[in-house]
Amino acid sequence: MADTGHRVPSPSQREEGGSPPGRESPTGPPRSVSNLSLTDDDLHWFGEGNHHRLYQKMGAHPDREGEVDGVRFAVWAPEARSVHVMGDFNGWSKGDHPLVPQGVSGIWTGFVPGVGQGEPYKYHIHSNLRDYRVDKADPFAFFSRTAPENTSVVWKLDYAWKDREWMERRAETRPAAAPVSVYELHLGSWRRSPDDPHGFLSYRDVAPMLAEYVGEMGFTHVELMPVMEHPFYGSWGYQVTSYFAPTGRYGTPQDLMFLIDVLHQHEIGVILDWVPSHFPSDEHGLGFFDGSHLYEHQDPRKGFHPDWNSFIFNYDRHEVRSFLLSSALFWLDRYHVDGLRVDAVASMLYLDYSRKEGDWIPNEYGGRENLGAIQFLRQLNETVYREHPGAETVAEESTSWPMVSRPTYLGGLGFGKKWDMGWMHDTLEFFRLDPVHRKYHQEYLTFRQLYASTENFVLSLSHDEVVHGKGSLLGKMPGDDWQRFANLRLLFAWMFAQQGKKLLFMGGEFGQWREWSHDQSLDWHLLQYPLHEGVRRWTADLNRLYREEPALHRRDFDHDGFEWVDCTDVENSVVSLLRRGDPGDRDILAVFNFTPVPRHSYLVGVPHGGRWVEVANSDADLYGGSGQGNMGGVVADAPGQHGRAWAVNLVLPPLGAVFLRHDGGE
């Protein structure tokens, strides 16, 4: 867990009772905030980069002045000469409703009477610099209209949550010791609707179907690819223009709340992809906001991303840090999400990321580390873990940066977990090989154990592995159709036997043939075929085994939770290992045959005598296998094998995995 030591409280923490105004408790909606005006404390902490809930004051908030209802607006534009609000309420006039500057803070505020819920609006900004004029969406809008309008919408976030038990229980969990198996999905292409011109199902339509399916499959969490508003659907949500608004493609903010609420009521956690690494250059967005490089770094060598043609946040600017911290807390406060998966962390950490020599600026010490980004990420994690016990942050970090998931007080970045990109790469390289060549590359399977306990890893087979010509997981497997499906079942078995939490992208769980396309639904019709249905059943049963057997999850991050039995039998391409839980938990033995040749009377050393029950076999008939196995279990006898006092005599099915649990004896 990140550092939770003493900190000077932010203004939101110094209100009555010491809790932030507007912060939702697990039991219901937030307390009302009587004064929406920015205080001196708000401005002070905003300027110091320590304001965590700017969304309570910035943006558009329905309010009342005297007896008149309207909306109070607040926007940060320090280089503006003037700022006006425009919308349907004034015929989109660029000069009818001016805002006024609040001191020297750079924030412009104003009250517009007669404006209410659902009103579209933008800010017309006239800059002090180069007589620049532009119409901008509200960076703090709670709702937006999608392209081509790209307008912000006045919106209240009232919602009657029904997930009290989930939220209370979550605050007391130990995520490191819990089973975590994540189903990653893209809402626009998981299932499609024939009734919508774009084919989209709404958040509300998806809710019962997704909850039922994920529950049936045994996943503990879903991870939603970014739902924050993004103008280009083909970016999959990773080009965000609105950091406080869910995309209107699938419904309203309350519709997304309903989806999360339903998932919680079905005991399913929700992780959101969150993108503080870059943002698009669309004119209505954050870029060049007030005629200056307000949110992005001014120098393109630090402020422009060459891979994605997007802007990079200026993490050295205190107000930008307040903006991003407020966005992170917003989704945890108001949408009850259980975690944030932070995208492209490596691109934030390195000043030379994807840049040629001469195209980047060293830091003040001459190094390539982005010191501002490091400070921001540590501050982010400290804030999340302090304010939302039980919630998690997960880093998509693709390099060997040390201590990503270690506490900040030890010098780490403070994330709860980190994706293990090395495991993904090595494992898929191994499984692509024809089995006849696998004996020459068994180190692809075993190398990970040299570093497996250095971070709190998530083993991810994500969307990135099934796009851009890479093909589907099933398509990567060698051999004829039967062997491809057997290899895919073997791949999933290997993942669930390893230390670390699990993540699988939608479609992989039933062996989708084609590469993922954001414009099409998954090929659900494939489930009518036995081999596809067999993979789905196997995935569900692996999730069940993972959740039910403490040895497979309690010590996912502990070196003592894993032990090789034998990883040197390269001639047979057989690997065996033990997983252990806490004292009193029963050991799990997992044995893998990476060739299509069955192995009979194969001896494997075990630490205990007595009966070992076969609790899972990827070659079982109901999964589409050949039905070879160990008749429900075996008895360990002496003499032993592999330096252990006992051994079990096993049948190893072709391209198969068997899991055995010690059930008693010596």
Image (cartoon, helix red, strand yellow):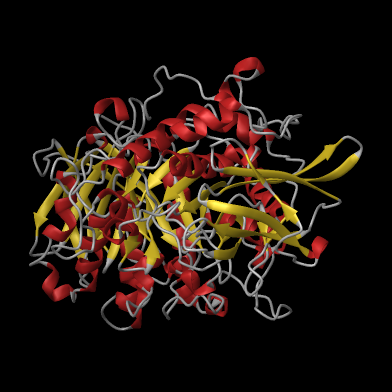
How many marks the image carries: the answer is 0
Whether residue 229 sits left or right of residue 399 in the image: it is right
- Residue at the extreme right of the image, as rendered: 67
Say whether residue 183 is visible.
yes
Q: Is residue 456 above or below residue 308?
A: above
- Foreground of the two, 402 or 137: 137
Instruction: Identify the residue at horizontal 44%, vertical 54% (top origin).
Output: 275
- Foreground of the two, 448 or 479: 448
Instruction: Identify the residue at horizontal 51%, vertical 34% (top origin).
Output: 46
Q: Position of residue 550 (x, y in %)?
A: 40, 36
Say whether residue 630 is visible.
no
Q: Is residue 412 above or below residue 126?
A: above
Q: Where is residue 511 in the image (x, y as percent from the top left)?
A: 43, 73
Q: Where is residue 555 in the image (x, y as percent from the top left)?
A: 32, 35
Whether residue 24 sits left or right of residue 71 in the image: it is left
Instruction: Identify the residue at horizontal 23%, vertical 73% (top origin).
Output: 432
The image quadrant of residue 188 is: bottom right
The image quadrant of residue 493 is: bottom left
Q: Quadrant of the N terminus?
A: top left
Q: Position of residue 630 (x, y in %)?
A: 32, 56
Whether residue 633 sits left or right of residue 601 in the image: it is right
Q: In this view, does 291 lie above or below 107?
A: below
- Foreground of the two, 642 or 347: 347
Instruction: Identify the residue at horizontal 14%, vertical 39% (top origin).
Output: 638
- Foreground of the two, 170 or 310: 310
Q: Quadrant of the C terminus?
A: top left
